[in-house]
Image: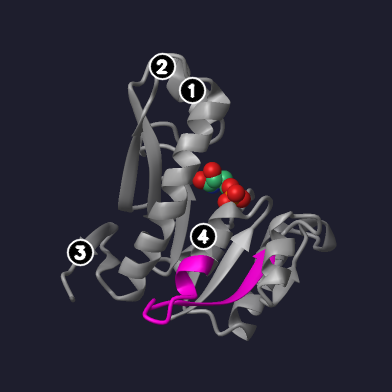
Amino acid sequence: KRTVIMISGRGSNMASLIEAASERSFPAEIVGIISDKADARGLHIAASRGLPARIIARGDFSSKEAHDAAIDDALSTFEAEIVCLAGYMRLLTTGFVEKWQGRMLNIHPALLPAFRGLDTHARALEAGMRIHGCTVHFVTAETDSGPIITQAAVPVLLDDTEAALAARVLKAEHHLYPLALRMVALGMARMEGGRTVFADTE
Ligand code: GRF
């Protein structure tokens, strides 16, 4: 399946997806990168892998709708079948999300439905959580609320700092996102009636 990754920054999840998809047997092919930030560090990784990248900045458009329409155009040009949000830090318009529903994934650094939104690691520590983790889900109009595809948990250690916990979760993310993309690309996980339906196709 032709897959486009959307980023805004560091791009470490993007890199893990590119790495996994470089295996011949992997069911998805990364065909392009879209960034809303010209200075996203992930763009250097994309370039070093020889992947085409498009910078589509919000500032170049008069409205959110026009911005998302340009992204949609780019996705068409890439002939994308699946879209992976990987640290794309902008809320998408409902029309765009609905068009890609069931074909657009996001990774969130918490065990949803706990800790939607930002600063998840600090909030998990503050809440006294003993486990924390990450979630890959289908993207729906409501942020961080779409049906869950897969999750990974990590322990919270007694002397954890936000940075240490973030690093532990990030490592799990790098493992989890390729797994989720694989499931969706193979049709082992699909969105139906607002839920994830799992099929054993192997
Ligand atoms: C990750 O923690 C991801 O879960 C969240 O944003 C961060 C992106 O990191 N959505 P990177 O750009 O993939 O390194």
Calculate the distance from the C-alpha at mark 2 to the C-alpha at mark 1: 6 Å
Calculate the distance from the C-alpha at mark 3 to the C-alpha at mark 2: 32 Å
Calculate the distance from the C-alpha at mark 3 to the C-alpha at mark 1: 31 Å
What's drawn in magenta, residue-wise? 19-35
Residue 25 counted in the magenta span? yes
The answer to whether residue 82 shows anywhere in this view is yes
Residue 149 picture location, percent across and down? 31, 56
The residue at which mark 4 appears reads as 16
Please tell me whether mark 2 sits on a helix, a strand or a loop.
loop
Residue 80 picture location, percent across and down? 53, 79
Quadrant in the picture for the C terminus: bottom left
Please tell me whether mark 4 sits on a helix, a strand or a loop.
helix
The residue at which mark 2 appears reads as 127
Task: Decide which of tag 2 and tag 4 comes sooner along the chain.
Answer: 4
Calculate the distance from the C-alpha at mark 3 to the C-alpha at mark 4: 24 Å
Q: Residue at x 33, y 38 (%)?
A: 153
Ligand 1 within 8 Å of disc 4? The answer is yes
Residue 22 relative to residue 111: left or right: right
**Nearer to me, 182 or 78:** 182
The residue at which mark 1 appears reads as 123
Residue 38 counted in the magenta span? no
Task: Decide which of tag 3 and tag 4 comes sooner along the chain.
Answer: 4
**Nearer to me, 106 or 90:** 106
Number of the front mark, 4 or 1: 4
Calculate the distance from the C-alpha at mark 4 to the C-alpha at mark 1: 26 Å
**Number of residues whose C-alpha sits closer than 10 Å to that of mark 4, classed few (under 14), some (14–19) or many (20 or more):** some
Would you say the residues marked 2 and 1 are in contact, meaning their CB atoms lie under 8 Å apart?
Answer: yes
The residue at which mark 3 appears reads as 198
Task: Decide which of tag 3 and tag 2 comes sooner along the chain.
Answer: 2
